[in-house]
Amino acid sequence: MKSIVTLALAATLGAASAADLRIYPSFSEVREPVQATGPTLTVTLPEAAWAGLIPGTLDLDGLTFSGAVQRQGAGWLASLEGKTVYVKRDDGTAEPVTLIRARDLLVRDAQGRYRTVRFEDLIFDVLPPPNPQAPTQTLTFTLPQPGTGTLTYLTRAVTWAPRYTLKASTGGAQLSALADIRNMSDLAYDVKGTELYAGDVDVQGGPPPAPMMMESRATAGNASADFAAPKINSLGELRGLYRYALSTPFALPANSTVTLPFLTPKLTLFERYAGLNTYFTPQNTDGTLSRFYRLKADQRLPGGSMTVREEGRIVGQTSISETPKGEEIEFSLGNDPDVRYTRTVQTVGSEKNAQGNVVKTTYKVTYTFESSKDRPVRAEVTERVGGRRITIDGTAKGQNAAAELRVDVPANGKATKSFTLVVDNS
């Protein structure tokens, strides 16, 4: 019989897996180089790698294979079966025993007696890996010929998100961003090359993992004394996705968040105002306006959370979606009790059809704003109107139009603004 020699390459992902990462908001593509010098390539993955892996995404890139078999293997502790380990006695000394079965921690002592022990009472001559009792998953690829390639898979365990800080003062405003790269697994990564992608990318394979507790956070500034923080550089657009790259390799510890400086866009527009977004009703109304902000940036902004500070103090948080360069961002941070409004509606006239039904009505809507602030404030109202044909202040607007009011309210003063509305449903 002809002898066939099979070379099994064990690419075990241990304390730190050397890999390239392409990180998206809800998943990552892990890319790890592999090499086979024979007709078989065996890759052994610990349970930590499988915890967030998206099923059906394991593949070999650049290396053709004719078949692959996945099986669950024994964990690290099972490799010690039949070997000597030690059990801690009540008096603190170590008793040598033979590990018989790893799955239920059955041991045999020097007198030949069997008993089960607790894992925390076991003592080893070598450093055990994380989760030493967990089984491993093994993939065996059959190759037409040896070569080098890249093992790839998608995982929910590694994600990223930008977070912005808007610092406003009487002199203007500044916008800056940080990038949080999160590893929610027990597997550490020694990352050689990193790309970050922002945008709407959906993949199949179950929901994302639960958010990580804040106690697990590790930042670029304190991860280690000799940590050389990489810079994040823009790589432009890829089919509607924003693409960035880290300038240097970095370590992504298990169960951690690495935070890096991200963007410092220049604001081409920044405005504060007291605002109201509402719908038309013929009834009189009153209430308070909300604290609104409006801004534009000179570069693309990936979606993320935003913290707003005024004079160094936090005044609210919000979130923004992916925003192209120069597109307006508008958001509210809640009510402003110092700016109130009173809205009155007067029916100016109406027209009826032959059946006596009102088909056209003209209204005059008046807003009176009152501010108790010691400085002037801009008040803006957007009032949306439903109907077949809408005319606002003599200008035809078509269907589902909006009336917009802008007025400066003096300090501790009042201001009034009106518009005429014609709703024609004939």
Image (cartoon, rainbow, N blue to C red):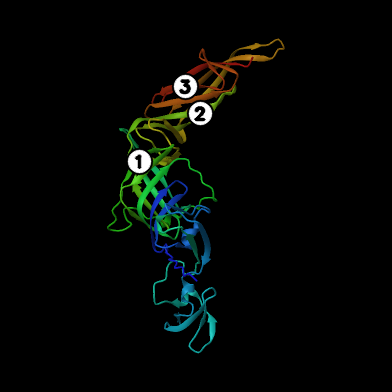
Residue type, label 3: Leu
Mark 1, residues whose alpha carbon is within 10 Å: few (<14), some, or many (≥20)?
few
Using the image, determine if residue 210 lies above or below residue 177: below
Regarding residue 71, the answer to whether it shows in the image is yes
Marks 2 and 3, the one that precedes in the sequence = 2
Residue sitting nearer the eye, 155 or 370: 155
Cα–Cα gap, marks 2 and 3: 11 Å
Residue type, label 2: Asn
Marks 2 and 1, the one that precedes in the sequence = 1
> How many numbered marks appear?
3
Q: Is residue 309 left or right of residue 364?
A: left
Residue shown at 53% from the left, 28% from the top: 278
Report helix, strand or loop for mark 3.
strand
- Residue 172, labelled with which disc? none
Farthest residue in the top direction?
354
Residue type, label 1: Leu
Report helix, strand or loop for mark 2.
strand
Q: Position of residue 147 (x, y in %)?
A: 39, 57
Using the image, determine if residue 271 lies above or below residue 77: above
Report helix, strand or loop for mark 1.
strand
Q: Which corner quadrant of the image does residue 245 belong to?
A: top left
Q: Nearer the viewer, mark 1 or mark 3?
A: 1
Mark 2, residues whose alpha carbon is within 10 Å: few (<14), some, or many (≥20)?
few
Marks 1 and 3, the one that precedes in the sequence = 1
Regarding residue 90, the answer to whether it shows in the image is no
Q: Position of residue 325 (x, y in %)?
A: 38, 32
- Residue 277, labelled with which disc? 2
- Residue 235, labelled with which disc? 1
Question: What residue is disc 3 on?
Answer: 405
Farthest residue in the front direction?
1
